[in-house]
Amino acid sequence: MNLANKLKIYGEVLEKEPMKKHTTYRIGGEVDYYIYPKNITELGRIIEILKEAKVPYYITGRGSNLLWTDHPFPGAIINMDRSINDYYFEEDGTVIAYAGCSIINLAIEAGKHSFTGLEFASGIPGSVGGGIYMNAGAYKSDLSNVLESVLVLDGEHIHWIRKEDLDFGYRHSIFQKHKDWTILAGKFKLEKGDAQEIRDLMESRHARRVDAQPLDKPCAGSVFRNPESIPAWKLVEQLGYRGKRIGGAQVSKKHCNFIVNENGDATAEDVWTLITSIQKDAKEKYDIDLITEVEKFNW
């Protein structure tokens, strides 16, 4: 039995799949195997098969924070969005959400259950797994503020790890150092609130995002982490990059911390060249090291 057929026992497998279909930048070369596991048991078996065959793999969510190279990837992508995406609400505000669950959907459902604490996340276009990995946040809050523990596949063992042991910080977690660990689910603790007030807050913030961010263009959200001394968007603007373009990639005229695939024809090299140019000027002119939120894959 060849590898593809073996993998298809445990999930849907797309062969020679363009990654540009699966990233919010709409950028990325072909991957040999793009896999949707059916459940966590089958996810574990798929990982075993890939390791036995010495095939490199990555686990992704909604592709909202990825800059994937234009080159082919001789390996596998495992996507958990389609089936490993359930969530559960308990009466005391405990929430269990699988890694493939949409952060936006989770925030909306929390509001419907009259639980407050996830309003800040109602505009983060990623999955719970990716959000935990990056400690995603907005409006001076982040997931670690409401997270209690994370269910992790560590080698052959599945176990819960307490938040205190996961080195959370600004857009940081221990998972960035342990890329061989697989985030399976998060356990969150929310508080009781008023459903109408929660809904009103999320709607007002949505209106602000639509007004301030280029949500109509392919992009990966905020490109740079905020330095301590100045917001990233303001620094990029001071450097004169608003609207600057390299190839098909452009610093958004609407929000300077967004780089957009303006006409849908940008390459990964276009985006990365623009990013590194901004970083170089920030260092030379202000002695500021701009760190990216966007993660590079297959470079």
Image (spheres, grey):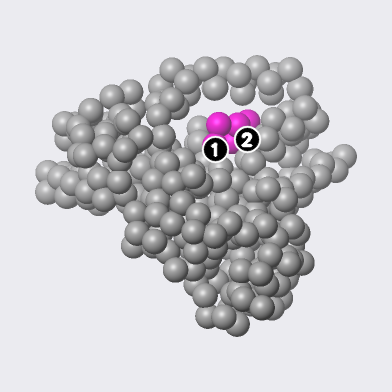
Relative to 4, say whether 168 is above or below: above
29 or 215, nearer to the observer: 29
Relative to 1, say whether 174 is above or below: above
Q: Residue at x 57, y 17 (%)?
A: 204
246 or 92, nearer to the observer: 246
Relative to 286, say whether 156 is above or below: below
Q: Quadrant of the N terminus?
A: bottom right
Q: Position of residue 56 (x, y in %)?
A: 50, 72
- Residue extending farthest to the right is 91
- Disc 2 on helix, strand or loop? helix
Relative to 193, say whether 134 is above or below: below
Q: Is residue 21 left or right of residue 107?
A: left
Q: Magenta stretch containing residue 257, yes or no?
A: no
* Picture quadrant where residue 13 is located: bottom right
Q: Are marks 1 and 2 in contact (CB under 8 Å)?
A: yes
Q: Residue at x 39, y 46 (%)?
A: 27
Q: What amino acid does circle 2 point to?
A: Ile
Q: Position of residue 252 (x, y in %)?
A: 30, 29
Q: Position of residue 225 (x, y in %)?
A: 37, 45
Q: Is residue 170 left or right of residue 248?
A: right
Please say whether residue 168 is visible from this viewpoint: no
Residue of label 2:
104
Q: Position of residue 156 (x, y in %)?
A: 69, 78
Q: Residues within 10 Å of mark 1 (few under 14, many from 20)?
A: some
For marks 1 and 2 on the same chain, the one whose residue lies earlier in the sequence:
2
Residue of label 1:
125
Please state the extent of the stretch shown in magenta in the rendering. 119-125
157 or 141, nearer to the observer: 157
Question: Alpha carbon of mark 1 to alpha carbon of mark 2: how far?
Answer: 6 Å
Q: Is residue 103 left or right of residue 270?
A: right
